[in-house]
Amino acid sequence: MTNASIEAADGVLDSRVPSLKQDIFSRGFAKVCLPILSVMLAVVLDILMPRSYEQKVVEEPWFSFLLLAVLGVYLFMLAYKKMRSSATAAAPFIAGAVLFFNIYNVLSAKLAVLPVLYFPAPDRILAVFTEDPVYLMTCVAYSYRLLLLGWLFGALVGVLTGVLVGFSKTASYWISPLVRGLGPIPSTAWIPLVLVAFPSVVSGSVFLIALAVWFPTTVLTASGIANIKKSYFEAASTLGASRFYQIIHVGIPAAMPNVFLGLFNGTCSSFITLMTAEMLGAKYGLGWYINWQKEMMAYSNVYAGLIMIAVSFYLIITGMFKICSRVLGWQEGVIKW
Protein backbone atom coordinates (compact mmCIF):
# COMPACT_ATOMS: atom_id res chain seq x y z
CA MET A 1 0.00 0.00 0.00
CA THR A 2 1.39 3.37 -1.00
CA ASN A 3 1.77 6.32 1.29
CA ALA A 4 -0.99 8.17 -0.57
CA SER A 5 -3.49 5.38 0.01
CA ILE A 6 -2.52 5.18 3.68
CA GLU A 7 -3.02 8.91 4.12
CA ALA A 8 -6.37 8.68 2.34
CA ALA A 9 -7.50 5.85 4.62
CA ASP A 10 -6.43 7.84 7.68
CA GLY A 11 -8.40 10.81 6.43
CA VAL A 12 -11.54 8.72 6.00
CA LEU A 13 -11.09 7.23 9.49
CA ASP A 14 -10.59 10.68 11.05
CA SER A 15 -13.74 11.92 9.37
CA ARG A 16 -15.72 8.98 10.76
CA VAL A 17 -14.51 9.32 14.36
CA PRO A 18 -16.60 12.43 15.22
CA SER A 19 -19.71 10.89 13.69
CA LEU A 20 -19.02 7.65 15.58
CA LYS A 21 -18.64 9.55 18.86
CA GLN A 22 -21.78 11.51 18.11
CA ASP A 23 -23.70 8.29 17.38
CA ILE A 24 -22.59 6.74 20.67
CA PHE A 25 -23.47 9.91 22.54
CA SER A 26 -26.89 10.08 20.89
CA ARG A 27 -27.64 6.48 21.84
CA GLY A 28 -26.64 7.12 25.43
CA PHE A 29 -28.62 10.33 25.52
CA ALA A 30 -31.72 8.58 24.15
CA LYS A 31 -31.35 5.84 26.75
CA VAL A 32 -31.13 8.40 29.57
CA CYS A 33 -34.19 10.25 28.27
CA LEU A 34 -36.42 7.16 28.14
CA PRO A 35 -37.67 7.43 31.76
CA ILE A 36 -38.29 11.16 31.36
CA LEU A 37 -40.39 10.65 28.24
CA SER A 38 -42.24 7.70 29.78
CA VAL A 39 -43.12 9.66 32.93
CA MET A 40 -44.20 12.75 31.02
CA LEU A 41 -46.44 10.67 28.75
CA ALA A 42 -48.06 8.97 31.75
CA VAL A 43 -48.64 12.27 33.56
CA VAL A 44 -50.14 13.91 30.47
CA LEU A 45 -52.50 11.00 29.88
CA ASP A 46 -53.47 10.90 33.54
CA ILE A 47 -54.33 14.61 33.56
CA LEU A 48 -55.92 15.05 30.13
CA MET A 49 -57.85 11.81 29.62
CA PRO A 50 -61.31 11.87 31.24
CA ARG A 51 -61.89 9.48 34.12
CA SER A 52 -64.39 6.67 33.73
CA TYR A 53 -67.60 7.23 35.67
CA GLU A 54 -67.31 3.66 37.01
CA GLN A 55 -64.12 4.46 38.90
CA LYS A 56 -64.33 6.17 42.27
CA VAL A 57 -62.94 9.71 42.23
CA VAL A 58 -60.03 10.46 44.57
CA GLU A 59 -59.20 13.85 46.04
CA GLU A 60 -55.65 14.12 44.69
CA PRO A 61 -53.89 12.75 41.56
CA TRP A 62 -51.70 10.43 43.58
CA PHE A 63 -50.59 8.49 40.52
CA SER A 64 -49.15 11.60 38.88
CA PHE A 65 -47.55 12.65 42.17
CA LEU A 66 -45.83 9.27 42.44
CA LEU A 67 -44.57 9.43 38.86
CA LEU A 68 -43.17 12.91 39.38
CA ALA A 69 -41.48 11.73 42.59
CA VAL A 70 -39.89 8.84 40.67
CA LEU A 71 -38.74 11.29 38.01
CA GLY A 72 -37.23 13.56 40.68
CA VAL A 73 -35.28 10.69 42.21
CA TYR A 74 -34.08 9.62 38.77
CA LEU A 75 -32.89 13.12 37.89
CA PHE A 76 -31.13 13.41 41.24
CA MET A 77 -29.29 10.14 40.54
CA LEU A 78 -28.25 11.47 37.15
CA ALA A 79 -26.97 14.70 38.68
CA TYR A 80 -25.04 12.87 41.42
CA LYS A 81 -21.84 11.60 39.85
CA LYS A 82 -21.48 8.46 42.00
CA MET A 83 -25.02 7.29 41.15
CA ARG A 84 -25.05 8.29 37.48
CA SER A 85 -23.93 4.93 36.14
CA SER A 86 -26.59 3.11 38.17
CA ALA A 87 -29.27 5.51 36.94
CA THR A 88 -28.18 5.04 33.33
CA ALA A 89 -28.20 1.26 33.65
CA ALA A 90 -31.66 1.31 35.24
CA ALA A 91 -33.11 3.76 32.71
CA PRO A 92 -34.73 1.17 30.36
CA PHE A 93 -36.25 -0.73 33.31
CA ILE A 94 -37.66 2.46 34.87
CA ALA A 95 -39.13 3.49 31.52
CA GLY A 96 -40.65 0.04 31.01
CA ALA A 97 -42.14 -0.07 34.51
CA VAL A 98 -43.68 3.40 34.12
CA LEU A 99 -45.07 2.40 30.73
CA PHE A 100 -46.65 -0.72 32.24
CA PHE A 101 -48.38 1.24 34.99
CA ASN A 102 -49.37 3.89 32.47
CA ILE A 103 -51.13 1.25 30.38
CA TYR A 104 -52.77 -0.17 33.51
CA ASN A 105 -53.93 3.31 34.51
CA VAL A 106 -55.48 3.91 31.09
CA LEU A 107 -57.22 0.53 31.02
CA SER A 108 -58.54 0.80 34.58
CA ALA A 109 -59.06 4.46 35.49
CA LYS A 110 -59.74 5.98 32.08
CA LEU A 111 -61.41 3.29 29.98
CA ALA A 112 -62.61 0.85 32.67
CA VAL A 113 -61.84 -2.07 30.35
CA LEU A 114 -60.76 -4.21 33.31
CA PRO A 115 -63.34 -5.21 35.95
CA VAL A 116 -63.55 -2.18 38.22
CA LEU A 117 -64.12 -4.17 41.40
CA TYR A 118 -60.98 -6.31 41.07
CA PHE A 119 -58.74 -3.82 39.25
CA PRO A 120 -58.97 -0.44 40.99
CA ALA A 121 -57.24 2.61 39.56
CA PRO A 122 -53.66 3.23 40.72
CA ASP A 123 -54.59 6.49 42.44
CA ARG A 124 -57.23 4.63 44.49
CA ILE A 125 -54.58 2.17 45.66
CA LEU A 126 -52.18 4.97 46.53
CA ALA A 127 -54.94 6.87 48.34
CA VAL A 128 -55.16 4.03 50.87
CA PHE A 129 -51.73 4.99 52.23
CA THR A 130 -52.93 8.55 52.89
CA GLU A 131 -56.42 7.82 54.22
CA ASP A 132 -55.44 5.72 57.24
CA PRO A 133 -51.65 5.41 57.49
CA VAL A 134 -51.67 4.91 61.28
CA TYR A 135 -53.85 1.81 61.09
CA LEU A 136 -51.82 0.37 58.23
CA MET A 137 -48.54 0.93 60.08
CA THR A 138 -50.05 -0.70 63.18
CA CYS A 139 -50.68 -3.81 61.10
CA VAL A 140 -47.10 -3.66 59.78
CA ALA A 141 -45.69 -3.35 63.30
CA TYR A 142 -47.78 -6.32 64.49
CA SER A 143 -46.57 -8.46 61.59
CA TYR A 144 -42.97 -7.43 62.19
CA ARG A 145 -43.22 -8.42 65.84
CA LEU A 146 -44.44 -11.91 65.01
CA LEU A 147 -41.93 -12.27 62.20
CA LEU A 148 -38.97 -11.10 64.24
CA LEU A 149 -39.70 -13.32 67.24
CA GLY A 150 -40.43 -16.39 65.12
CA TRP A 151 -37.44 -15.82 62.86
CA LEU A 152 -35.00 -15.38 65.75
CA PHE A 153 -36.16 -18.55 67.51
CA GLY A 154 -36.22 -20.56 64.29
CA ALA A 155 -32.82 -19.33 63.10
CA LEU A 156 -31.13 -19.92 66.47
CA VAL A 157 -32.54 -23.42 66.92
CA GLY A 158 -31.94 -24.25 63.25
CA VAL A 159 -28.25 -23.29 63.34
CA LEU A 160 -27.70 -25.18 66.62
CA THR A 161 -29.50 -28.25 65.30
CA GLY A 162 -27.53 -28.14 62.04
CA VAL A 163 -24.23 -27.86 63.94
CA LEU A 164 -25.14 -30.82 66.15
CA VAL A 165 -26.16 -32.96 63.19
CA GLY A 166 -23.08 -31.96 61.19
CA PHE A 167 -20.46 -32.51 63.91
CA SER A 168 -21.90 -35.24 66.13
CA LYS A 169 -22.70 -38.70 64.85
CA THR A 170 -24.72 -39.44 67.98
CA ALA A 171 -26.82 -36.30 67.56
CA SER A 172 -27.24 -37.04 63.87
CA TYR A 173 -28.46 -40.56 64.70
CA TRP A 174 -31.28 -39.22 66.90
CA ILE A 175 -32.08 -35.87 65.28
CA SER A 176 -31.81 -36.63 61.53
CA PRO A 177 -34.89 -38.90 61.43
CA LEU A 178 -36.85 -36.18 63.23
CA VAL A 179 -35.70 -33.54 60.75
CA ARG A 180 -36.42 -35.73 57.74
CA GLY A 181 -39.81 -36.83 59.06
CA LEU A 182 -41.25 -33.62 60.45
CA GLY A 183 -39.34 -30.96 58.50
CA PRO A 184 -40.97 -31.41 55.07
CA ILE A 185 -44.46 -31.02 56.58
CA PRO A 186 -45.68 -27.47 55.87
CA SER A 187 -45.74 -25.46 59.07
CA THR A 188 -49.32 -24.37 58.37
CA ALA A 189 -50.38 -28.02 58.61
CA TRP A 190 -49.73 -27.82 62.36
CA ILE A 191 -52.40 -25.15 62.86
CA PRO A 192 -55.02 -27.52 64.41
CA LEU A 193 -52.51 -28.69 67.03
CA VAL A 194 -51.18 -25.19 67.62
CA LEU A 195 -54.66 -23.88 68.40
CA VAL A 196 -54.93 -26.50 71.16
CA ALA A 197 -51.36 -26.54 72.47
CA PHE A 198 -50.65 -22.81 72.73
CA PRO A 199 -52.46 -20.39 75.05
CA SER A 200 -52.62 -17.46 72.62
CA VAL A 201 -52.60 -16.66 68.92
CA VAL A 202 -49.34 -14.74 69.28
CA SER A 203 -47.39 -17.63 70.80
CA GLY A 204 -48.87 -20.09 68.31
CA SER A 205 -48.01 -17.83 65.38
CA VAL A 206 -44.44 -17.39 66.63
CA PHE A 207 -44.08 -21.17 66.85
CA LEU A 208 -45.33 -21.70 63.30
CA ILE A 209 -42.94 -19.07 61.91
CA ALA A 210 -40.03 -20.51 63.89
CA LEU A 211 -40.86 -23.96 62.53
CA ALA A 212 -40.84 -22.62 58.97
CA VAL A 213 -37.36 -21.12 59.49
CA TRP A 214 -35.96 -24.05 61.47
CA PHE A 215 -36.16 -26.78 58.81
CA PRO A 216 -34.25 -25.18 55.86
CA THR A 217 -31.71 -23.64 58.24
CA THR A 218 -31.04 -27.01 59.87
CA VAL A 219 -30.75 -28.94 56.62
CA LEU A 220 -28.48 -26.46 54.83
CA THR A 221 -26.29 -25.86 57.87
CA ALA A 222 -25.72 -29.59 58.31
CA SER A 223 -25.10 -29.95 54.56
CA GLY A 224 -22.55 -27.13 54.61
CA ILE A 225 -20.68 -28.72 57.49
CA ALA A 226 -20.71 -32.14 55.79
CA ASN A 227 -19.12 -30.66 52.65
CA ILE A 228 -16.19 -29.01 54.45
CA LYS A 229 -12.84 -30.42 53.38
CA LYS A 230 -11.31 -32.69 56.02
CA SER A 231 -7.95 -31.12 55.36
CA TYR A 232 -9.14 -27.97 57.15
CA PHE A 233 -9.75 -29.87 60.37
CA GLU A 234 -6.57 -31.91 59.98
CA ALA A 235 -4.52 -28.72 59.62
CA ALA A 236 -6.20 -27.19 62.68
CA SER A 237 -5.62 -30.39 64.67
CA THR A 238 -1.96 -30.44 63.64
CA LEU A 239 -1.61 -26.90 64.99
CA GLY A 240 -3.01 -28.04 68.35
CA ALA A 241 -6.62 -26.77 68.03
CA SER A 242 -9.16 -28.44 70.26
CA ARG A 243 -12.39 -29.96 68.95
CA PHE A 244 -14.44 -27.01 70.21
CA TYR A 245 -12.04 -24.55 68.58
CA GLN A 246 -12.30 -26.42 65.28
CA ILE A 247 -16.10 -26.21 65.39
CA ILE A 248 -16.23 -22.50 66.24
CA HIS A 249 -13.33 -21.17 64.16
CA VAL A 250 -13.14 -23.66 61.27
CA GLY A 251 -16.39 -25.54 60.77
CA ILE A 252 -19.02 -22.84 61.27
CA PRO A 253 -17.21 -20.11 59.24
CA ALA A 254 -16.66 -22.56 56.37
CA ALA A 255 -20.36 -23.49 56.40
CA MET A 256 -21.63 -19.89 56.56
CA PRO A 257 -22.65 -19.71 52.85
CA ASN A 258 -24.97 -22.67 53.40
CA VAL A 259 -26.19 -21.20 56.68
CA PHE A 260 -27.22 -17.99 54.92
CA LEU A 261 -28.93 -19.95 52.16
CA GLY A 262 -30.94 -21.74 54.82
CA LEU A 263 -31.83 -18.45 56.47
CA PHE A 264 -32.91 -16.94 53.14
CA ASN A 265 -35.13 -19.91 52.36
CA GLY A 266 -36.49 -19.84 55.88
CA THR A 267 -37.31 -16.14 55.54
CA CYS A 268 -39.36 -16.82 52.41
CA SER A 269 -41.23 -19.61 54.18
CA SER A 270 -41.74 -17.43 57.25
CA PHE A 271 -43.58 -14.78 55.21
CA ILE A 272 -45.94 -17.40 53.81
CA THR A 273 -46.55 -18.79 57.28
CA LEU A 274 -47.01 -15.31 58.73
CA MET A 275 -49.81 -14.49 56.28
CA THR A 276 -51.60 -17.73 57.19
CA ALA A 277 -50.96 -17.50 60.93
CA GLU A 278 -52.48 -14.02 61.14
CA MET A 279 -55.75 -15.40 59.83
CA LEU A 280 -56.22 -17.60 62.93
CA GLY A 281 -57.82 -14.84 64.96
CA ALA A 282 -55.43 -11.93 65.07
CA LYS A 283 -56.76 -8.39 65.37
CA TYR A 284 -53.92 -6.78 63.45
CA GLY A 285 -51.28 -7.73 60.89
CA LEU A 286 -50.83 -7.52 57.14
CA GLY A 287 -52.20 -11.01 56.51
CA TRP A 288 -55.26 -10.28 58.62
CA TYR A 289 -55.68 -6.89 56.95
CA ILE A 290 -55.62 -8.38 53.44
CA ASN A 291 -58.09 -11.12 54.36
CA TRP A 292 -60.40 -8.60 56.06
CA GLN A 293 -60.37 -6.18 53.12
CA LYS A 294 -60.97 -9.05 50.69
CA GLU A 295 -64.11 -9.99 52.57
CA MET A 296 -65.15 -6.32 52.46
CA MET A 297 -64.56 -6.37 48.67
CA ALA A 298 -62.16 -3.42 49.08
CA TYR A 299 -59.54 -4.56 46.60
CA SER A 300 -57.71 -1.24 46.57
CA ASN A 301 -56.87 -1.92 50.22
CA VAL A 302 -55.92 -5.49 49.34
CA TYR A 303 -53.41 -4.24 46.77
CA ALA A 304 -52.07 -1.71 49.29
CA GLY A 305 -51.48 -4.54 51.76
CA LEU A 306 -49.71 -6.59 49.08
CA ILE A 307 -47.47 -3.62 48.29
CA MET A 308 -46.55 -3.33 51.97
CA ILE A 309 -45.70 -7.04 52.07
CA ALA A 310 -43.55 -6.77 48.92
CA VAL A 311 -41.70 -3.71 50.23
CA SER A 312 -41.19 -5.30 53.65
CA PHE A 313 -39.88 -8.52 52.19
CA TYR A 314 -37.55 -6.64 49.83
CA LEU A 315 -36.11 -4.55 52.66
CA ILE A 316 -35.60 -7.56 54.93
CA ILE A 317 -33.94 -9.70 52.27
CA THR A 318 -31.78 -6.79 51.10
CA GLY A 319 -30.68 -6.17 54.69
CA MET A 320 -29.83 -9.84 55.11
CA PHE A 321 -27.74 -9.80 51.95
CA LYS A 322 -25.89 -6.72 53.19
CA ILE A 323 -25.06 -8.61 56.37
CA CYS A 324 -24.11 -11.66 54.32
CA SER A 325 -21.73 -9.57 52.21
CA ARG A 326 -20.03 -8.28 55.34
CA VAL A 327 -19.76 -11.69 56.99
CA LEU A 328 -18.70 -13.47 53.80
CA GLY A 329 -16.33 -10.78 52.58
CA TRP A 330 -13.75 -13.50 52.02
CA GLN A 331 -16.16 -15.25 49.60
CA GLU A 332 -17.52 -12.27 47.69
CA GLY A 333 -20.00 -13.21 44.99
CA VAL A 334 -20.93 -16.64 46.42
CA ILE A 335 -24.50 -15.49 47.19
CA LYS A 336 -26.02 -12.64 45.19
CA TRP A 337 -29.29 -10.74 45.39
Image: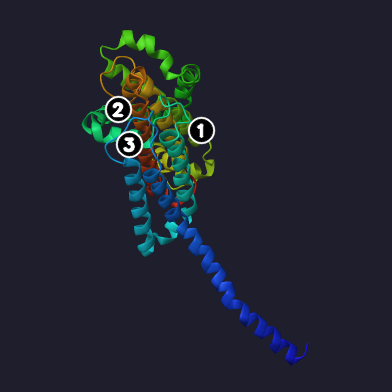
Residue identified by numbered label 3: 126
Question: Could you tell me which secondary element the residue under label 2 belongs to?
Answer: helix
Q: Foreground residue, 294 or 252?
A: 294
Quarter of the image where one finds residue 270: top left
Q: Foreground residue, 264 or 111?
A: 111
Residue 169: x %, y % from top left:
48, 26
Residue identified by numbered label 2: 143
Q: Is residue 59 left or right of residue 107?
A: left
Q: Which residue shows up at 28% across the image and 40% down it?
A: 60
The answer to whether one can see residue 218 in this image is: yes
Tell me: residue 249, above or below residue 3. Answer: above
Contact between marks 1 and 2 (CB within 8 A): the answer is no
Q: Is residue 81 left or right of residue 131?
A: right
Residue identified by numbered label 1: 223
Whichever of labels 1 and 3 marks the residue nearer the N terminus, that label is 3
Inspect the image, locate mark 3, and give the three-letter code of the amino acid beneath it.
Leu
Instruction: Please tell me whether mark 1 or mark 2 is closer to you in this view.
Output: 2
Question: Could you tell me which secondary element the residue under label 3 belongs to?
Answer: helix
Instruction: Please tell me whether mark 2 or mark 3 is closer to you in this view.
Output: 3
